[in-house]
Amino acid sequence: MKNQDQKNTAATSATADEWHRQAVSRSNCYGLLALVFRDVPTAEIVAQLTVPPLAEALSHLGYDATQDLAGELDAVTKRLGEQYTQTFVGPGGHVSLYASVHHSGEGQLWGDSTVWVKRFIERTGLSFKDNWDSIPDHITIELELMQRLTAYEAQLWILNSSHGSKNTEEQLCQCLHMQEQFLNEHLCVWVPRFCERVLETSTSLFYREMAKLTKSVILSGAEQVKVAQSALSCN
């Protein structure tokens, strides 16, 4: 058993920097998308999307922000604000930003999936931001949860590389398991449906591209967590 533990620690240490970089990258992507879907964009947010680090995060995802965000800042902000409202707020047909509307045909706010998300967040020991007033399964809240979990994972990879303790590996496996559960049992269930609805109904090139990126980030994130768990031999 001791030899196996030493083997796992050595394998993990050899790739710790890469695992750390991947976790940081996933965290940045989740944070960026959480910002995009949070509310009608302000001029400050639009400006941030065209310069590092947000522009770099978009570029990493394969999207050139300058394509849709070129022009006078106030004009671009107004245009994106109108597109956000039309796509996600209404009046008229719009795509809800809440999971329970899309999850397993619930089609309503505060469905069973909302309660599940609330309890899941409580189990993590995390809390909502003080200035956030919304139903718990808003896509931004869920993406921010993943942002924080992956940021914690990144810290643990560094600790595991320098200390290599069994306790740190257990914490890593626990963190990865939480991500796996939230992705496979929730985000991978409803987010692809949400993204397809945006692609079907929105006339906004920007938010259509964000929908494509969001679907890709969620599905690839689930695969990356699976690979990381295998590298650590998590049960």
Image (spheres, rainbow, N blue to C red):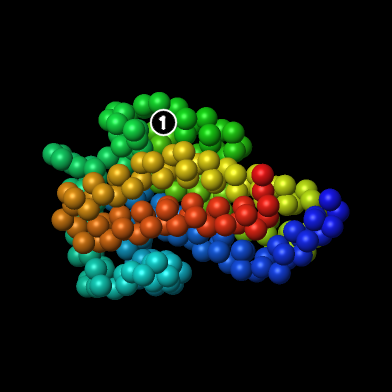
Neighbourhood count class around disc 1 (C-alpha, 10 Å): few under 14, some 14–19, many 20 upward: many
113 left or right of 128 in image: left
Q: Quadrant of residue 100?
A: top left
Foreground pick, 126 / 62? 62
Is any part of residue 31 visible from this angle?
no
The answer to whether residue 91 is above or below residue 195 is above
The answer to whether residue 133 is above or below residue 43 is above
Determine which residue is flagged by label 1.
Answer: 113
Is any part of residue 79 visible from this angle?
yes
Q: Which x, y percent locates residue 154?
A: 62, 59
Which residue is depicted at the point 70% across and 47% down? 171
Q: Count every numbered label the image shows and give the total.
A: 1
Residue type at the position of mark 1: Ser
Q: Quadrant of residue 105?
A: top left
Which residue is depicted at the point 67% across and 48% down? 234
Which residue is depicted at the point 51% across and 63% down? 25
135 left or right of 76 in image: right
The answer to whether residue 69 is above or below residue 97 is below
For mark 1, give the secondary structure: helix
Farthest left residue in view: 92
Which residue is depicted at the point 78% across and 48% down? 167
186 left or right of 93 in image: right
39 left or right of 30 in image: left
Q: Specify the quadrant that holds the C terminus.
A: top right
Q: Which x, y percent locates residue 33?
A: 39, 55
Foreground pick, 224 / 53? 224
Q: Which x, y percent locates residue 4?
A: 80, 56
Q: Quadrant of residue 59?
A: bottom left
